[in-house]
Image (cartoon, rainbow, N blue to C red):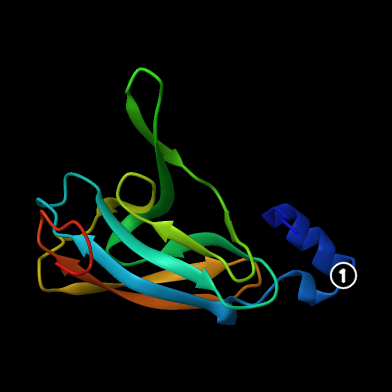
Amino acid sequence: MKLPFASLAVALALGMPSALFAGSQDVVAENAWARASIGTSRPGAAYMTLRNTGEEPVVLTGLSTDLAMMPDIHRTTTDAQGMTSMAPAGELEIASGEAIALEPGGLHVMLMQLQRPMVEGESFALTLEFADGGEMQVDVPILGIAARGPEE
């Protein structure tokens, strides 16, 4: 069952069972990584796989980090003419037993208004915020500027 954030507030106010909103404790973040940045004038990006090990869908509603003033989930799309663009993806529902890949060329964490450079060999904390009010902190290692995945 997919419910937008406003529906969550209404449902809770009406006393609907909280089982409708699966626990963020059922989410596992795997293979988190980011690329080093060139200074702070351009956005950074982070990637990972989010797996829901629970029995109900989980909704990712937001992100926070001290590394960037505007972290957000973005979706990259390419149209029929080959033009690529990025736009905010909004809330993400992760179905029971499923995973969502945040990867180059698709869904990803966009880190806008960097507060410091992303330096290879360092890491940063990224907090994932869920519709159930839960949060999960992910340590994101920063790889080289040309990295293509967490194995590099």
Q: Which of 72 and 105 is in front in this view?
A: 105
Query: In x, y percent, where is residue 136?
Result: 47, 77
Quarter the N terminus occupies: bottom right
User: Residue 65, image x and y in percent?
Assistant: 35, 66
Q: In this view, does 36 lie to the left or right of 49?
A: left
Is residue 150 shown above or below 111? below
Find numbered disc 1 in the image and state the secondary structure of the residue it sits on: loop
Please give the residue where the numbered disc 1 appears in the rendered image: 16
At 42% from the left edge and 59% from the top edge, which residue is drawn?
Answer: 101
Vertical position of residue 28 compared to residue 59: above or below:
below
- Direction from residue 118 to residue 44 in the image, left or right: right
Residue 148 rendering spot, x and y as whole percentages: 19, 56
Q: In which quarter of the image is residue 45?
A: bottom left
Identify the residue at image location x=79%, y=75%. Answer: 18
Residue at the image position 78 percent from the left and 70 percent from the top: 20
As shown in the figure, which amino acid type bears the numbered disc 1?
Met
Quarter of the picture holding the C terminus:
bottom left
